[in-house]
Amino acid sequence: MTQTDRKVTVGLRERKKEKTRLAILDAAIDLFLEQGYDSTTVDQIAGAVEISPRTFFRYFTSKDHLALWFHDHGEEIMLETLRDRPLDEPPFTSLTHALRAVLRDMQDSTAEDAARFLKLRRLLDENPHLFGLSVARGAATERRLAEEVAARRGVDVTTDQRTHLIVAFAMATMRVGFECPRPDMTAVQNIARQLDEAIDLAQNAFRPDWDT
Amino acid sequence: MTQTDRKVTVGLRERKKEKTRLAILDAAIDLFLEQGYDSTTVDQIAGAVEISPRTFFRYFTSKDHLALWFHDHGEEIMLETLRDRPLDEPPFTSLTHALRAVLRDMQDSTAEDAARFLKLRRLLDENPHLFGLSVARGAATERRLAEEVAARRGVDVTTDQRTHLIVAFAMATMRVGFECPRPDMTAVQNIARQLDEAIDLAQNAFRPDWDT
DNA sequence: GTAATCTATGTCAGTTGATGACATCTGACA
DNA sequence: TGTCAGATGTCATCAACTGACATAGATTAC
């Protein structure tokens, strides 16, 4: 999650804003892990960061949005990676590269960002409601990826089922790879290994050229 | 959605309850389609059925729950079908039978139930929030299916990634098959054709014996 | 450097979804 | 018929948002 280094030469305003955003995020995550997601109110979070509750909603559209924070970034990376892949590459292969790019970004991120990610991930696993939202967010990403893949394949995204299957299978692989079967999955390294395994399994499952 | 014919010889109370449940559902669906999901309040729905808002929440745990009504039934059918399949059948094949069972149940249901389903489905497609919830509900089903499949395969559900991939791919196929690319998908027959296509595509995508 | 402007934030009031507590009414059943 | 359990209504309350407006602090123009 290398989100902190996007801005380079920006005004005081922007920097302060980003600082506040991260402060809210960190305070919220800690409160969530401490006393549970549901029993943490927006007022508490706002209080911890010393902002008004109204301001909270100017940074995050909802309480849920907090927990899905890194999804936005991940989606961006996947789309960018996908666009950079050669057009003649089989789409599923391109998508696996996109998956790995997300992982790589995580490994390259600052310790703080990685810690945030791991904490949020734990949260998602403990809370079915949040887990559901995460999956839902993944579905939104899937749509965007499908549009991109359809364009690359030169087919109509509204009718081509194969495109949807390709993307859906890729996202399914990602979900399985990122799953948290046991609480010992607290290191980025472990997640990386698991995702690799999942991708390998997936790639070996398909017939050659199934996705063209 | 053959949910109305479950009760056979039950008391007046039960029948009345079921009637109320369907009345709420129908009133809600119509209001949703008429004026949008978000701008329909629970008070309005309750008013339309002439019950107190508090009672509404005794029938449906939330407004969202309404829109996911048929998921419960679908999940039941999938699990039942899966359990009835021969143990030596490849798991993905068993799961495709489970998918088709859901579809068959829909085709066999009363006209009212089918209409409810189609309306709700349209609603899900128009409202990203609801669509997300639907996907999330699918993820919950996926978990239960994974447990069942793991048991049938004799593997540990917490560690066996292949099991998760198999189920995730099956659910992905289902989602693609049920998708509503164009608004002309207003007949059960059309959905059936599309799901068949998706299943065929999926089955041809895999190497033989990839799921054993 | 100062004035004009833009924007982040606070305050306040209001809507809506959801839940607990308690009273009441009605079908079930002896 | 009378008792009891379960269904419903009423009331109070909480928490997640949202719009409107005022203000303070950052940015820009001059």
Image (cartoon, coloured by chain):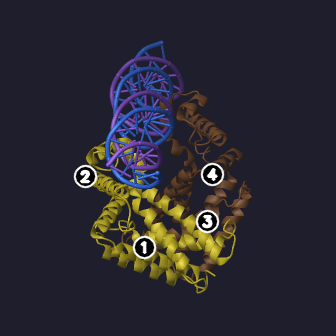
Chain colours: A yellow, B brown, C purple, D blue
- Neighbours of disc 4 within 10 Å: few (<14), some (14-19), many (20+): some
Mark 1–mark 2 Cα distance, whole angstroms, equals: 28 Å
Q: Viewed as shown, does residue A175 lie left or right of B24?
A: left
For the residues labelled 1 and 4, the Cα–Cα distance comes to 30 Å
What type is the residue that disc 4 sits on? Glu
Labels 1 and 2 touching (C-beta < 8 A):
no
Label 4, on which residue? B126
**Can you say whether B11 is above or below A116 in the image?**
above
Q: Amino acid at mark 2?
A: Glu
Residue B176: which disc? 3
Mark 3 is surrounded, within 10 Å at the Cα level, by few (under 14), some (14 to 19) or many (20 or more) other residues, namely many
| Residue topped by disc 2 | A34
- For the residues labelled 4 and 2, say whether their Cβ atoms are less than 8 Å apart: no
SS at circle 2: helix
Q: Is residue B87 visible?
A: no
Pointer 2 indicates a residue of which chain? A
- Mark 1 or mark 2, which has the lower sequence index? 2
The subunit carrying tag 4 is B
Q: Are marks 1 and 2 on the same chain?
A: yes
Q: Point out the frontmost of discs 2 and 3.
A: 2
Q: Amino acid at mark 3?
A: Val
Residue B178 in the image, given as x and y percentages of width and height: 63, 61
Q: Position of residue A57 (x, y in %)?
A: 41, 46
Report the Cα–Cα distance between label 3 and label 4: 16 Å
Q: Quadrant of the C terminus of chain A?
A: bottom right
